[in-house]
Image: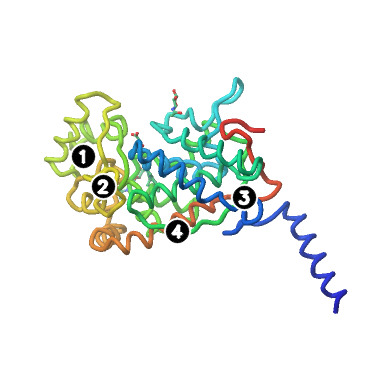
Amino acid sequence: MKSAYYVVEFLVLVEVILRGGEALSMNYYGMSCPFVEPIVRIVVNQALHKDPTLAAGLLRLHFHDCFVQGCDASVLLDSTSGNTAEKDSPVNLSLRGYEVIDQAKKFLEMQCPGIVSCADIVALAARDAVFWAGGPYYDIVKGRKDGTRSKQEDTFTSLPAPTLNTTGLINVFSQHGFTVWELVALSGGHTLGVARCSSFKSRLSSFDSTHDVDPSMDPTFAKTLLNTCSAGDSAAQPFDATTNSFDNLYFSALQKGDGVLFSDQTLYVSPQTQQIVNFFAMNQAIFFFNFQQGMMKMGSLDVKEGSQGEVRANCRKIN
Ligand code: HEM
Ligand SMILES: *[C@@H]1O[C@H](CO)[C@@H](O)[C@H](O)[C@H]1NC(C)=O
Ligand SMILES: *[C@@H]1O[C@H](CO)[C@@H](O)[C@H](O)[C@H]1NC(C)=O
């Protein structure tokens, strides 16, 4: 009996070595860094207490990280003399929250040096930011490793443009394995934060051959957006009336024609997604449940495990 036990143990060991280390799990840092979650939460809560608008920044950072090359903290790497990083792509428009990740990393390096990946910190910080803003809480697996590639050009093909219609959005999201429901639920991340005029001004003049202004917009809201843009390309327009609260008002705004980006309003215009928008606008719990499922899936996109990646000492540089 005992020898059978050793055979099993040996096979498990071989499997772990072949896979290049441990797989993702809820309890990944259970022995090596048991306080990782409270440490990240404290840092995030302190930062959001000072600047509540950073909740949006932290959520978007995680989205941009996961959609480009998987959730491997590639979005945090600084450009070097030979390489223009994702961070410096034009689509980075106002990515924020890097200092919060650095701060969490600093404390984690003091507590358990070389153990916790930057990719896990980004995923935890986004989760904690959503919860802090009143959104759903969900458990996330840990054990993502940090990647070494971060190239500006990767962002052009992997991230959706705000000018896409529903067909285009479904294409991009399905390339990453998401369903139409998950596309609409994750778009609900726009319940937090703002967009700059440069991201939606194409809706406001010479929209197409027959319309000056995007006809899917409510006319009064079009005036609001024009007014925002009178302050210049970097003027910010909140996605909904409660910009720092995670709620379902984003979907109610879409029903009224008050979506800020073309890619927001298209979800209500398209018969393929209109009913889903209606569900989420009517019942916040349905939205929260679907958002939570979508985030857990997003947080596992093309994750690097074991020897496929490293644990960076500094989130902005490869080791
Ligand atoms: C559906 C396709 C999506 C498109 C086309 C899109 C595009 C954009 C654009 C253009 C902005 C404004 C950038 C600026 O002008 O400063 C923005 C902001 C934002 N996005 Fe998305 N996004 C999408 C999906 C998502 C998802 C899935 C999430 C997270 C779950 C997300 C979270 C955010 C947040 C929180 C902001 C506000 C950032 C801030 O206030 O600092 N977006 N997005
Ligand atoms: C975004 O990219 C531009 C260059 O396209 C760069 O100047 C800017 O610093 C970047 N922003 C962030 C927050 O990294
Ligand atoms: C969506 O956009 C694509 C590419 O721009 C276009 O070919 C297609 O006709 C559009 N679909 C709808 C329903 O407007």
Disc 2 crowd rating (10 Å Cα; few below 14, some 14-19, many 20+) is many
Which residue sits at x=50%, y=50%? Answer: 38
Work out how far the residue at label 3 is from the one at label 1, CA to CA, in angstroms: 52 Å
Earlier residue among tags 3 and 4: 3
The crowd level at tag 3 (other Cα within 10 Å; few <14, some 14-19, many 20+) is some
Q: Mark 4 points at which residue?
A: 138
Q: Which residue is the site of mark 1?
A: 214
Q: Which residue lies furthest to the top in this view?
A: 81
Mark positioned earlier in the residue sequence (2 or 1): 1
| Amino acid tagged 4 | Tyr
The response on whether ligand 1 sits within 8 Å of label 3 is: no
Q: Position of residue 219 (x, y in %)?
A: 12, 41
Q: What is the three-letter code of the residue carrying label 3?
A: Cys
User: Does the CB distance between marks 3 and 4 fall below 8 Å?
Assistant: no
Provide the secondary structure element on which disc 4 rests: loop
Q: Distance between the residues labelled 3 and 4?
A: 20 Å
Picture layout, residue 85 above or below residue 3: above
Q: Residues within 10 Å of mark 1 (few under 14, many from 20)?
A: some
| Pointer 2 residue Cβ closer than 8 Å to ligand 1 | no
Q: Do the residues labelled 2 and 4 touch (CB within 8 Å)?
A: no
- Secondary structure beneath label 2: helix
Q: Which amino acid does label 1 sit on?
A: Asp
Q: Residue at x 54, y 53 (%)?
A: 300
Residue for badge 3: 33
